[in-house]
Image (tube, rainbow, N blue to C red):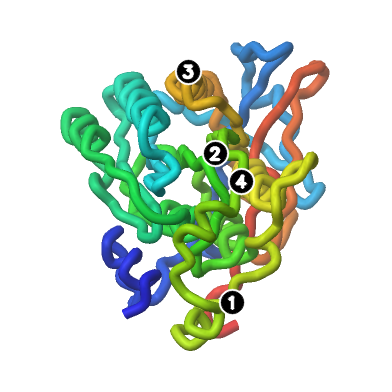
Amino acid sequence: MTLFYACLLAAGLDPQAPAPPPVFSAGVEAVYLDVFVTSRGQPVGALAAADFDVRDNDVPQAPTLVDRQSVGLTAALVFDASGSVAGEKLSQLRAAGHAFIDGLGERDSASLLTFSEEVLLPVAPTRDRAALHRALDRIGTRGATAVRDALYVALRQPREGGRPMVVLFTDGEDVVSWLTPEEILACARQSDVLVDVVASPERPDPMAEYRAAVRQPDALRQEQGAPPTTSWERTPRGPEESAHVRFLRQVAETTGGALWTAASTDLPRVFREILEATRTCYVLSYELRGVPRTGRHRLKVSVKGRRVDVRARTEYVVPAPPGR
């Protein structure tokens, strides 16, 4: 059994089963968008559905407002548990997780996934705060980093109700994932999950972890069905944003989320800010009109007549039904 198949089994997913239908499926009539509206960094409240201009492939849509408090939040905390997180950084990450869980509302639920060389699901989606706190305290660290594989598991995780979101923390480059950036971006476009990524830059050599944990040469990876290690994975960190960080930013911004960078001591504050932002965002829903449902959809969301900053999903994909 390959390592990636073991990761899927550990997280409660059957690697032999067909992939579940994506959220943006041909049979789903409504599109849901999380929309963050701010002015000078502060949330803008008291907006009505008529204040929003929503364009799907440049065609105006007629959105309605959804009461977020009535549907709650289903959050997946996805935490890097590789060897580089050991020590004080792990303590701060646990504190951030505790702060996030303490801030959840009565209708909210959460799960905890951890990743290093494998992806684990210590706690499935639950409203049991005590179970989540206990699991956070038991997080250990070892091995290398498989960010992309963890994102895939989080995006595919079964959910029941609630607006879904992923809050992923990582402190280093992905060096052992089986899945490619393109595969993860495709998965994100077919899911309505909001993804926020928190990256800690406190590592002077992003490839040190790879050299310390070289697990499989390319020939063996290909023999077991995985793509070879690519130049993308080996891109060194330079004065500009690295390819790895650009990928994380693209995943987050595609879904309407954001990339946050923070020193380890700031992690609790950043996690509280992420949760607070979800309390002030608008949830819009619309039934698609004037645009073929299947295919790639580019989205533009703005507020009419207001100079404000708007953050929302930039695109989604509806695959054609099987057999077409």
Q: Earlier in the sequence, mark 2 or mark 4?
A: 2
Specify the quadrant that holds the C terminus: bottom right
Q: Alpha-carbon neighbours of circle 4 within 10 Å: few (<14), some, or many (≥20)?
A: few
Q: Position of residue 111 (x, y in %)?
A: 30, 42
Q: Earlier in the sequence, mark 1 or mark 2?
A: 2
Query: As drawn, is 250 to the left or to the right of 202?
Result: right
Note whether residue 275 is visible. no
At label 2, which amino acid type do we have?
Val
Q: Which mark is residue 1?
A: none
Q: Position of residue 151 (x, y in %)?
A: 48, 53
Q: Which mark is residue 269?
A: 3
Q: Which mark is residue 197?
A: 2
At label 3, which amino acid type do we have?
Arg
Q: Alpha-carbon neighbours of circle 1 within 10 Å: few (<14), some, or many (≥20)?
A: some
Q: Alpha-carbon neighbours of circle 2 within 10 Å: few (<14), some, or many (≥20)?
A: many
Determine which residue is flagged by label 1.
228
Query: As drawn, is 182 to the left or to the right of 174?
Result: right
- Discs 1, 4 touching: Cβ within 8 Å: no
Q: Determine whether 155 is above or below 50 in the image.
A: below
Q: Determine whether 267 is above or below 62 in the image.
A: above
- The residue sitting at 50% across, 20% down in the picture is 266
In the structure shown, which secondary structural element does the residue marked by tag 3 occupy? helix
